[in-house]
Image (cartoon, rainbow, N blue to C red):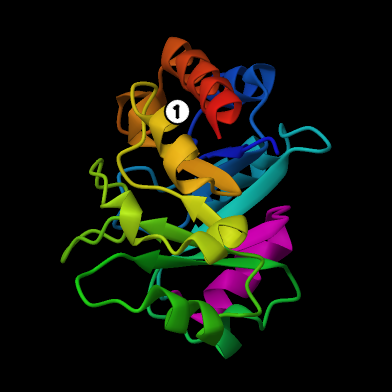
Amino acid sequence: MRTRVKICGLTREQDIDAAVAAGVDALGFVFHPASPRAVGLDTAARLVARVPAFVTSVGLFVDAEPGHIAEILRRVRLDLLQFHGREPPAACAGFGRPWIKALAMRDGLDVEAAAADYQGAAALLLDTYDPVLAGGTGRRFDWDRVPPALAPRVILAGGLDAGNVAAAIARVRPYAVDVSGGVEADKGIKDHRKINDFMQGVCDGDRRR
């Protein structure tokens, strides 16, 4: 099976073009104001309009008000929603879009129990826990904590880059991987060479899985 790839935190048109040219499956746009990669409504609408057919546009939210999410959906063509806060399942499912639930891999988290709670999710994104940041930590967690039976539902995130993504895929065998800081020159500014190197790493991992 080919591992799907999502690049998150897009803020520039040229970075969208580079990611699409490299063969990325999904592009993430951050609607969390505290993030250095956040985009406003007008910018998001312009960027998403550039995303071609068969590439998924993902909106990332952190405990956002339902009215705020609804307003964004009226103006921005998002295919998939990603919830990175403490949103309960009913809140995630209330917008008529498929959705992903991110789980921060804090100590003591029962991943299988959380997966059962969020069984309506299209996928579970497993990310490194940080007491302050809701994502984009640039640090990896212990991949051995991912239950093998859940791997087909898992989007693996947290500290991935061209140097470790092949090993991550070979060990976890996730449905997809998610990267942001690992392909950046600066926060929100993607490095096109790093994108291509990351995609090569994914191909290498697929040969080993």
Neighbor class of circle 1 (other Cα within 10 Å; few <14, some 14-19, many 20+) is: many
Q: Quadrant of the N terminus?
A: top right
Image position of 56 (left or right of 143): right
Q: Please provide percent x and percent y for residue 167.
A: 40, 31
The magenta region covers: 64-81
Q: Please provide percent x and percent y for residue 156.
A: 46, 49
* 94 is within the stretch colored magenta: no
Residue 9 visible (yes or no) = no
Image position of 180 (left or right of 202): left
Residue at 63% x, 67% y: name it: 99
Q: Please provide percent x and percent y for residue 30.
A: 46, 51
What is the quadrant of residue 188 in the picture?
top left
**Residue 53 or residue 36, whichever sits in front:** 53
Residue at 53% x, 20% y: name it: 204
Which residue in the rendered view is the most extreme toward the right?
53
Residue at 53% x, 45% y: name it: 173
Q: Quick one: SS at disc 1?
A: helix
**Residue 42 or residue 50, whichever sits in front:** 50
Q: Which residue is mark 1?
A: 166
Q: Quadrant of the C terminus?
A: top right
Q: Is residue 142 above or below residue 163?
A: below
